Amino acid sequence: MKHLLIIPVFLFGFFATAQFDYGVVGGLNFHATGPLKTSISDVGNFRETAKRKAGYFAGVYGKVNVLAFYIRPEIHLNQLQSEYETFNLSTINLEAPVSFGYTIFPSTSLFAGPSFRYRLSEEIDLTFEDIQSKTSMGAHIGTRVSFGGIALELRYERGLNSREIEFLNENGIEGQFDSRGEKWILGISFSFK
């Protein structure tokens, strides 16, 4: 019975020391999907790598600070692009990164965590089979520097689960590429606290 009393004491201590913050966030992302791979019997194996293209994101965040640690869930509308020599890929996703951070200096923090993604739309210049799943998961790591109510961040994100797309181009060449990709994110957030 005494162990049950520890839970309310812990929760009271947590909320007594916690500080809450919320605001808007947005910025640029530089995205590239995985390599394009085809197998052409008369030519041999072919591999093409995506060039990074700039996209954008905008959303909201909430943040709970406890001492030097924090949890910061976000929701973004995210537009991504990748450019290959033979086609372009453009997607719009609803993303939910959750950052677990540590404040190393009063204005600087390091963070990492999972990122959940739901594909709202995808445009590609090829005929391709339907992607089985619209959801995917990634991981991110980054740093954030705050200047009062404004914060600048640099984040790297990588997809974790494979999202290979099979395609058939107008010349009848079959192949596949992994659309999960990786991206660098340069963002700015404004606190309403």
Image (cartoon, grey):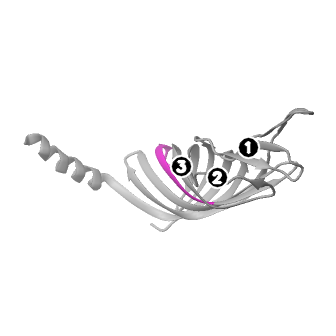
Image quadrant in which you'd find residue 181:
top right
**Which stretch did the figure color magenta?**
93-106
Label 3 secondary element:
strand
Query: Residue 191's spot in the image, x, y percent?
Result: 51, 64
Cα separation, mark 3 vs mark 2, equals 20 Å
Q: Is residue 49 above or below residue 130?
A: above
Label 1 secondary element:
strand
Q: Is residue 53 above or below residue 112?
A: below
Question: Furthest residue to the right?
Answer: 42
161 with respect to 30 (left or right): left
For the question of whether residue 133 can be seen, the reply is yes
Residue that carries the numbered disc 1 in the rendered image: 177
Image quadrant in which you'd find residue 162:
top right
The image shows a total of numbered marks equal to 3
Circle nearer the viewer, 3 or 1: 1
Q: Which residue type does callout 1 highlight? A: Phe
Q: Is residue 26 shown in magenta?
A: no
Residue that carries the numbered disc 2 in the rendered image: 131
Q: Which residue type does callout 2 highlight? A: Ile
Residue that carries the numbered disc 3 in the rendered image: 115
Question: Furthest residue to the bottom?
Answer: 192
Callout 3: 10 Å neighbours few (<14), some, many (20+)?
A: many
Q: Which residue type does callout 3 highlight? A: Ser
Asked whether the beta carbons under mark 3 and mark 1 sit within 8 Å of each other, the answer is no
Circle nearer the viewer, 3 or 2: 2
For the question of whether residue 25 can be seen, the reply is no
Query: Residue 40's spot in the image, x, y percent?
Result: 86, 36
